[in-house]
Image: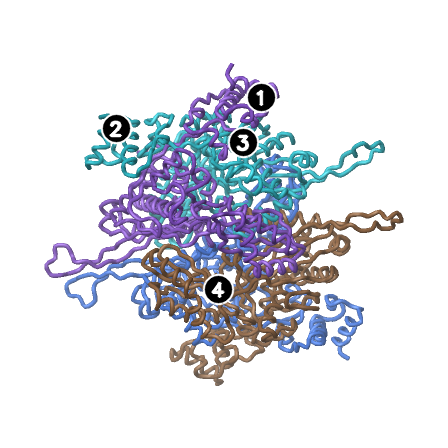
Chain colours: A purple, B cyan, C blue, D brown
Amino acid sequence: MTDADSLARRVREGDLRLHELEDHADHDTAASARRQLLEADTDADLEAIGSYGFDAEAAESAIENMIGAAQIPMGVTGPVSIDGGAASGEYYLPLATTEGALLASVNRGLSVLDDAGGVTARVTKHGMTRAPVFRVSGVADAAETVEWVETNGDRLAEAAEETTSHGEVIGIEPYVVGDSVFLRFAYDTKDAMGMNMATIATEAACRVVEDETPASLVALSGNLCSDKKPAAINAVEGRGRSVTADVVIPGELLEERLHTTAAAIVEANTRKNLIGSAKAGSLGFNAHAANVVAAAFLATGQDEAQVVEAANAITTMDTREREQAAEASESGDSETVTDLYASVSLASLEVGTVGGGTKLPTQAEALDVVGVRGGGDPAGSNADTLAEVIAAGALAGELSLLAALASNHLASAHEDLGR
Amino acid sequence: MTDADSLARRVREGDLRLHELEDHADHDTAASARRQLLEADTDADLEAIGSYGFDAEAAESAIENMIGAAQIPMGVTGPVSIDGGAASGEYYLPLATTEGALLASVNRGLSVLDDAGGVTARVTKHGMTRAPVFRVSGVADAAETVEWVETNGDRLAEAAEETTSHGEVIGIEPYVVGDSVFLRFAYDTKDAMGMNMATIATEAACRVVEDETPASLVALSGNLCSDKKPAAINAVEGRGRSVTADVVIPGELLEERLHTTAAAIVEANTRKNLIGSAKAGSLGFNAHAANVVAAAFLATGQDEAQVVEAANAITTMDTREREQAAEASESGDSETVTDLYASVSLASLEVGTVGGGTKLPTQAEALDVVGVRGGGDPAGSNADTLAEVIAAGALAGELSLLAALASNHLASAHEDLGR
Amino acid sequence: MTDADSLARRVREGDLRLHELEDHADHDTAASARRQLLEADTDADLEAIGSYGFDAEAAESAIENMIGAAQIPMGVTGPVSIDGGAASGEYYLPLATTEGALLASVNRGLSVLDDAGGVTARVTKHGMTRAPVFRVSGVADAAETVEWVETNGDRLAEAAEETTSHGEVIGIEPYVVGDSVFLRFAYDTKDAMGMNMATIATEAACRVVEDETPASLVALSGNLCSDKKPAAINAVEGRGRSVTADVVIPGELLEERLHTTAAAIVEANTRKNLIGSAKAGSLGFNAHAANVVAAAFLATGQDEAQVVEAANAITTMDTREREQAAEASESGDSETVTDLYASVSLASLEVGTVGGGTKLPTQAEALDVVGVRGGGDPAGSNADTLAEVIAAGALAGELSLLAALASNHLASAHEDLGR
Amino acid sequence: MTDADSLARRVREGDLRLHELEDHADHDTAASARRQLLEADTDADLEAIGSYGFDAEAAESAIENMIGAAQIPMGVTGPVSIDGGAASGEYYLPLATTEGALLASVNRGLSVLDDAGGVTARVTKHGMTRAPVFRVSGVADAAETVEWVETNGDRLAEAAEETTSHGEVIGIEPYVVGDSVFLRFAYDTKDAMGMNMATIATEAACRVVEDETPASLVALSGNLCSDKKPAAINAVEGRGRSVTADVVIPGELLEERLHTTAAAIVEANTRKNLIGSAKAGSLGFNAHAANVVAAAFLATGQDEAQVVEAANAITTMDTREREQAAEASESGDSETVTDLYASVSLASLEVGTVGGGTKLPTQAEALDVVGVRGGGDPAGSNADTLAEVIAAGALAGELSLLAALASNHLASAHEDLGR
């Protein structure tokens, strides 16, 4: 009888509970025992789930009640040339997904972007946020609390920053609704996604608020952060990185490679991504940025639930006229070519290259493919680069899908690729 | 020289392109060659990514340019008793995540829910949607088109249903904005998530619209679907399954197991999930439903990018007074106990148990753990069950986090669990 | 001592309360007494407020505690030719406002629209809504209630329609959130704005729901109506009339009359009304539709608080290329002219031509100016016409402001007009 | 033949245009001529519209193409005691409306608020905003522009403030979407609503931006202001005044005066204003704040179209337990009474007491009734007071309606009051 058999028996006999197995055996054995128990209870065969390739003990900070791993197919897209605020040069972007045709689509887009001279990208705003909610007796106390906070930002920042060696307070914004006061703390968390850093630092600051004002903490997160919910406050003010990628694609390239025109793509973008999204009451004005963000998050060890707000994007497409010498013209005549300006602006892309899931083997390797594993130099530059590369990938996805829609063959593409 | 070496060399020499390798070797060799090329280009070591456990050829419908797999730690939560419209009995829910403490939190919640007598759940609405956008010359033609569609729904349904053996048209809703007409088709797609089925069927219907009205198709998706964007139209009207899970938890159980009271939890929910979300301009009125939805989607082979709208949830918490005989009372006195009513309503949970990522080995095993792999009997009942089980998991997560917030120790929980 | 003096004295002595004066004197005297009391209490001189021109007794259904009237300057815009679903011919639109430059702007726009051949307009959807919220014990009862409602729509419609001689039930849509069930009733209310008709009819239907299901009514309005709040449900599904007005304006006319081009107007609309509104998390994708809607509502006796949702509009502007014979060309050469397609789609314009404020003298006269006072033939056609005329006015306002913005002189226009 | 006859004839003969009459006669005569023309064209009799009581020439800054005035019935509500940041003492609030039962409802609420000890109110944030949109060539230039703006805020403020004797720049917030840069300028505009002041000042600052950065102005308003549209940016960040009014109402008073309990009101508020609004995708979490805001705006000369965002409000209602000596108790026993905490928080209430419509006679008198006509001492205090008084009125309206809903008699109230 193996150790796993023995552990499983003790659970069946009520001697141990399912989450206590790691206290009585190594992590692999504990996982094995759980699979055994589940297989008995459910008729499932968990061989594939049990064939994981990482150190179960090291995964302890990522999972409890472990039984193994989900394996998500990973492919690679790129390379594409990026002129970024942090990124500079050629980049590959690994994507993990079960959405057939996605990588083909992104690759097609990246290839066109590269041929157009590459992508320009910039992080235009950054700050990981945490927004506790406090109870006060009424608006008189709320106003007093807000005034104290506005006058004593330094003290709150000091208390917050004592909890962290990396994080810095960028701002503290108060909001009042009746007898609730919300304080939205924003932090520079460098190469960490930073939510836990922000949570711990904010908790320290909250103790000062409670000491010095009439306010009592109700919840460390009062949903104005907003974490893992699609909220306008993030779309407007940003969270994590606000990043834009853009490009100008020559009209000739659109025709040769995407079999369409700038005007047709602009029309599809306007009717679908702008007007359609407006009519839908949407917080996302894009075609499928979430596909790229989710797949890049999975590959590189980001928080998958943050795709909810990280995928928030506005895609813009516009025609640009360009005069050039007419082909085969001896007379010096010029002709007008219509190029495409295309951009994707992700308002709240929360990414990190240290901590969390980035330490797992497949995820760390994927970060190596991008060239951003671990802390950057200067601090924060790796996460900035990752944000810019993902934005470039999202732009490629938007371009490719809009071109396909413009060509009116979305469904047939799916049929061909067997989905 | 292995086949992979040879393929890689041909790519380097410009003889082959990275996405063409499967045409010249088996899928494992092609992936191996790609890893070799990436390792050379990027200094990454891709051993872990290369250690995947599925049939690369079978994964062809899920990925292109494959290099291997991302491995995401998977654990198990439950069991919990569910009284659902489809679900009935005890259920485990596997979750794949790198979010430490999540499974512990969900498990704590499920355990309390189970002790409270289990979860009640119902799918209250269903329908996978696809909403093409058409161009017309102006509103006169738009009105004419809408009128034709409203009169000829049967013809459109017939054309749509010819493309599918399972899907049924539930409704076709027209929307007009200037010279754009959107038609939102809703389908019963049984146990399939159904987006591709809906896309293909809608394309057939669009051809009829184009033949019979002044409208010309611009894009098969006009963003009123809305797929992978957080849109009010889904929050209001639903997409996939609209599912609610709820429970009444005795006050005594709250104190014993969660060390808090119904009133404290209700206060945290109201200030954070209702008022905080309102002030944030949010489409999600919950604490962290996305954590459970994302992890369940990963484990069971759902479309990870759909977490964006699938996690859209309203969490409600309310006190309920209950009279009971006073303890140790000989006089027949009664006392009032305050119980907690808790619910999570997910408006647009898109799930399937056939097709897409559900066919991959680890994902199929996870579906077996829930007991819903493949098509249900009656058709649709497996996907309904999965929706109800995920809703129960989300309810557990909400309960657990709100109880923790009410106890004011979110950050310290994170510290303890090493995140 | 006048009657008013005497009434005022009795209030001062505590013998009467301010709202009881109409029980002891005619309405004019009561109003006079109130002014007297206010003048004494506040040092205000209420002569202008006291100089009203309507029958105070007849205003009893519009106001309580009357002291007189607010006088809002009214002007006239138009005429403009409208080809509508109901409207047909030349229309004036009276506007009451204190927003200097508004009428000049709308008039400039209407004049251009008229020269372009007039406005096309259509009501594409209609239905006044009321959505009560019910309490159930949990989602099991919620699902049962929804099922009953879906099966027994006829009974609910019958009960509702017994309360009204005009209204007809168009639809009843159920929504479930935890232990709350919302039913959104939509009515055809003909020429009445219809909110009170809808309220009364819905109350009757609610009694049936309470009798036949486990649901108990909590509030006759559960905010899914949504009345006087800017809600996506109205923007998506409509309320009152969904109406679009559009036009194609020749490029030559844009240059002559608005000193700009289609391309410049389209750019302003796209960056401001589409992208800017998207970034702002807006439910309104327009420049200033509310100015026209508010002023038309004031002039014609509509409910001013409904401007909140009635002004919800998406403005689209697009270029349209047109080939024409080149000027002064003997060779038959053609040239391309770029025209402007412009539209405004108001999703939830609640208007009526009977009942409410439409009976007051100045408002009734304004309705006569439009030609839609009282019930139409067929019923509903007067309210449809009013909706189409307001939409044409809104289109004129959008066109004029966007043209001005395109010409970059908004502020100077304000300076010139003395605001 | 009167002057008006003669003017009318000249218009008919094509000698004059309708908007040119003031150049050829005094303003009253011009209005008279327009009425004459309209009466001939439309069969309307415009006697009531022609019976206005203000100086037509003085109204020139408020209207063009004047024909007269709309008369809206005005009543008075209050008095109520307010402990505000600016307001202090007893206040009346005049309301102009055609919404029967509204004043009765507000008055009932104010009376209860007053008996509960009066309303507490505070302006918690202020700032009139204007947000131009600029065109740049791409995100590289956008980032450069943003950096310049962030470094040179002083220069922009200086340029802006040169245009105004009163206004001060509070902040300048940049937002980037692709090749569009938005700058949201916020101003302290003292007792003026301030939109025109903000527009003119911002235009001056824009010239500096254009001189010093790659950005070109496209529109002085880029819809991130946001003016007259319901936008999350205003709901989150505020515009004009963010003001809260609140109160604690003893349980006994609720029963005596409103025939209901705190618990019943809280339930109605939670299901309708919080959960219902959440489900509706609403930006307004209240019952009918717009009724009070619209009526107060009309009475006091505010911009009626701004009701769209000014009515944006979150209403919160909560129970508060209070221990008190039991009635008729000799033993010193205590009993628990459940009081009601009620609040209304208006995020973006744009009000002024100077300029615009406040100068018209009936509106100026209404401002006198509130005691806030003209500039305050200190500057801004009159507009602050008006904001606090309107918030108190909105709170009264919410309380009254929720109590009525809780008592389940909304429709019957309407029936009784003859609507």
Q: Is the same chain shared between marks 1 and 3?
A: no
Real-space CA distance between mark 3 and mark 2, rounded to the nearest whole angstrom: 44 Å
SS at circle 1: helix
Residue at 53% across, 47% down = A163
Respond whether the residues carrying marks 4 and 2 are from the same subunit.
Answer: no
The residue beneath circle 1 is A11
Q: Name the residue under label 4.
A: D171
Q: Residue at x 33, y 35 (%)?
A: A75
User: Residue B4 shows which numbered tag?
Assistant: 2
Disc 4 residue type (three-letter): Gly
Asked if labels 4 and 3 share a chain, the reply is: no
The residue furthest top is: A1
Quadrant location, the C terminus of chain A: top left
User: Earlier along the polypeptide chain: callout 3 or callout 2?
Assistant: 2
Work out whether residue B286 or residue B268 is closer to the camera in this orientation and state it: B268
Disc 2 secondary structure class: helix
Answer yes or no: do the residues labelled 1 and 4 have beta carbons within 8 Å? no
State yes or no: discs 4 and 2 in contact (Cβ < 8 Å): no
Q: Which of marks 1 and 3 is in front?
A: 1
- Quadrant of the rendered image containing residue B337: top right
